[in-house]
Image (spheres, grey):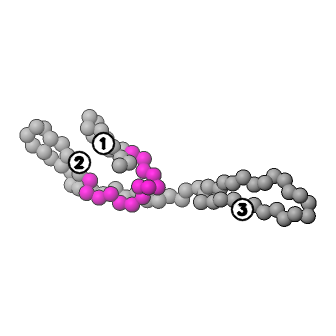
Amino acid sequence: TWASFNVATGLLNGTPTNADVGTTSGIVISVNDGTVTTALSAFSISVANTNDAPVISGSPATSVNEDSVYSFTPSVS
């Protein structure tokens, strides 16, 4: 689903995301002149996971009363 094929130029391109990590196999590209069809051998594309930057978020309190405990735990993924 992350790749597209341009029938006019023959270009197969796209940008995979984390949801596309893994191998897509059985890809076949063929051409037909109206009489005969010829195809490349089936091939696979493997999308490797990359080290994505971590995400940190949260809204810490910006003030605290003296002699009171202050605590903030950010959300991370």
The mark closer to the camera, 1 or 3, is: 3
Question: What's the amino acid at mark 2?
Answer: Ile
Q: Quadrant of residue 68?
A: bottom right
- Mark 3, residue position: 73
Is 30 on the left or on the right of 51, as rendered?
left
Instruction: Report the Cα–Cα distance between label 1 and label 2.
Output: 9 Å
Disc 1 and disc 2 in contact, CB within 8 angstroms: yes
**First reached walking from the N terminus: tag 2 or tag 3:** 2
Q: Which residue is mark 1?
A: 5
Question: Disc 1 versus disc 3: distance between alpha carbons?
Answer: 46 Å
The residue sitting at 26% across, 38% down in the picture is: 7
Highlighted magenta segment, given as a residue range: 14-27
Residue ID at (30%, 42%): 5
Q: Position of residue 67 (x, y in %)?
A: 91, 64
> In the picture, residue 25 is in which quadrant?
bottom left
Q: Position of residue 23 (x, y in %)?
A: 35, 60
